Amino acid sequence: MKEFIKNWGIFFVLAAIFIALRLFVIAPVSVNGHSMDPTLADGQKLMTYQLSTIDRFDIVTTEEPDDLDKLAVKRVIGLPGDQVQMEEDVLTVNGTEINESYLEPYKQEFAEDRMQNEYTYNSAFQDIAENADNFTNDFMYEVPEGQYFVLGDNRLISRDSRTFGFVDRSMIEGEVAFRYWPLSEISMINNY
């Protein structure tokens, strides 16, 4: 028995550590769709950190409140108790204007051609873009305690808190920390 423990003990300890990390600390997730373009692309593989505190502008994985079987990748915009407002593509949180520099590539493209070239893969998206007055439709929300307001970066077509409502903290599975696929795009995720 001692010989077995000596030969295999380290393997079992490492396997137990790996399983514990996978169950309680990190989790893989795939981006499904275009709602986080251009920050994250359809089909990319990510690692999430499940023990993270959630801050504004973190990219998180969350269950969708109206379909708990779906796991979405979104950006946290409003924290519990925040007043979040979008008017004429200007975001304000609690009365303070927020610069969303991560949206600049798509906001510029929207200003030039309403995203027609970007959405050549989907005629319904092209119709949405053609009829849009702003890159992000105007809204105003008061975020309830224990809830979060999340948006996709590709605001014209994203299904997010504007559609499915606020996200309870218990639905957020983790903060996206690392992109590991495709190999040519391996990187840490800068949330803002």
Image (cartoon, rainbow, N blue to C red):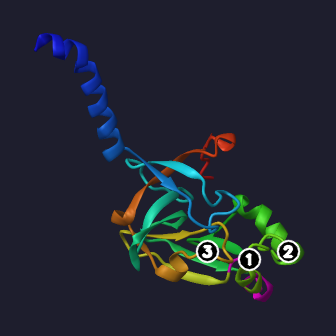
172 horizontally vs 99: left or right: left
Name the residue at the bottom extreme: 131
User: Residue 108 versus residue 63: which sits nearer the camera?
Assistant: 63
Residue 151 is situated, as x and y percent measured from the top left of the image, at: 57, 70
Residue 37 position by quadrant = bottom right
Element assignment for label 1? loop
Does residue 88 sit above or below 100 in this rendering? Answer: below
Q: Residues within 10 Å of mark 1 (few under 14, many from 20)?
A: many
Mark closer to the chain start, 1 or 3: 1
Q: CA distance from mark 2 to mark 1?
A: 8 Å
Q: Which mark is residue 158?
A: 3
The answer to whether residue 121 is magenta is: no
Residue 94 is situated, as x and y percent measured from the top left of the image, at: 55, 71
Q: Give the magenta range.
A: 128-136
- In percent of the image, x 47 and y 80: which residue is there? 164
- Identify residue for label 2: 111
User: Residue 100 versus residue 28: which sits nearer the camera?
Assistant: 28
User: Residue 70 versus residue 148: which sits nearer the camera?
Assistant: 70
Q: CA distance from mark 1 to mark 3?
A: 11 Å
Element assignment for label 3? loop
- Identify residue for label 1: 135
Mark closer to the chain start, 2 or 1: 2
Name the amino acid type tagged 3. Answer: Ser
